[in-house]
Amino acid sequence: MSVGIISHHLCASHEMGKQHPESPARLSAIQDQLIRSGLDSVIRQYEAIPIEPELLSLVHDPEYISYIFDNSPGEGYFDLDDDALMNPHTLKAALLAAGAAVQAVDLVMNKEQAAVFCATRPPGHHATKNRAMGFCFFNNIAIAAAYARKHYHLQKVAILDFDVHHGNGTEEIFANQPEVLFCSTFQHPFYPFSGTGETSSNIINTPLSSSASSEEFRLAITRQWLPALEKFEPEMLFISAGFDAHAEDDMSQVRLYESDYRWVTDELRAFARQHCEGRIVSVLEGGYNLSALGRSVVAHINGLIGN
């Protein structure tokens, strides 16, 4: 299956402090592993295009969008949240990350690529309609899903989030919207301490124990995600691809490996080929151990390709 990657060097210009785990080095680690694996020579790479600002309002409140633009600092940092600091380059990087997700939809829907992975930052799945949090400013995956529905008139889409943190922003944006299925696996209890209360029928939250291994993760996908997808019958899949549940990542206690990310990607690719014309857009979320992140992304992309 043909797969493209979208990135941009300016996504590395956003930083929230020298020791911050959500660092520019994450993108370098991914690129290094793509080169080492040989994938860089067999997949088409695209440069991200900034999102048109009006498309941000597909999922974010206009007042929030204005607040982000108005407070982009000329120097130093501006604190939108304890875990969401803007430097002078953050707004540009965030617009590129959101734009890449929209661009990926266009590439897939216009049949230029069957699947696209966005190697961009900052991530997005914690950003709510009106709040930046958890390293996230604009909800890239939510924007992409909403754009696909509005611009290409898709009736039903599904978002699958295997980051170790609950995708609270994505859930908030799409709760009670029966045309969007949102499935999230995450360590619990853990930041942002959501995802275990009552919610709407289009939300499938699957908390994992802090000691969760490959078996618990795979059972959750097999018993909850896959039956929900079969019943829902989406026309396109969107993946919030966070790799911070890796055993080598100190961000969490869950112990997954590259083989688990390859397995879940294989399962989603097989479903997409059978039900969605193979259409998948995947967007980078977490993953902070640089070596594990790069290797996991390679496993994920190999799964999208079907190597």
Image (cartoon, rainbow, N blue to C red):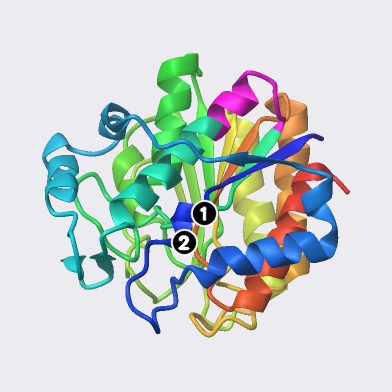
Which residue is tagged 1?
9
Q: Is residue 70 visible?
A: yes
Task: Report the front residue among 162 and 117.
Answer: 117
Residue 81 position (above or below residue 246): above
Residue at 77% in and 29% down: 274
Q: x, y (%) of residue 3?
A: 74, 39
Q: x, y (%) of residue 234?
A: 58, 28
Q: Residue furthest front?
A: 74
SS at badge 2: helix
Bin the neighbour count of mark 2 within 10 Å (Cα to Cα): few under 14, some 14-19, many 20 and up: many
Q: Which residues are magenta?
A: 104-114
Does the magenta run of residues contain 110? Answer: yes
Residue at 68% in and 26% down: 276
Which residue is tagged 2?
12
Q: Which mark is residue 100?
A: none
Q: Is residue 107 left or right of residue 275?
A: left
Bin the neighbour count of mark 1 within 10 Å (Cα to Cα): few under 14, some 14-19, many 20 and up: some
Q: Is residue 307 left or right of residue 102?
A: right
Kindly indicate whether the residue at mark 2 contacts the one at mark 1 (C-beta within 8 angstroms): yes
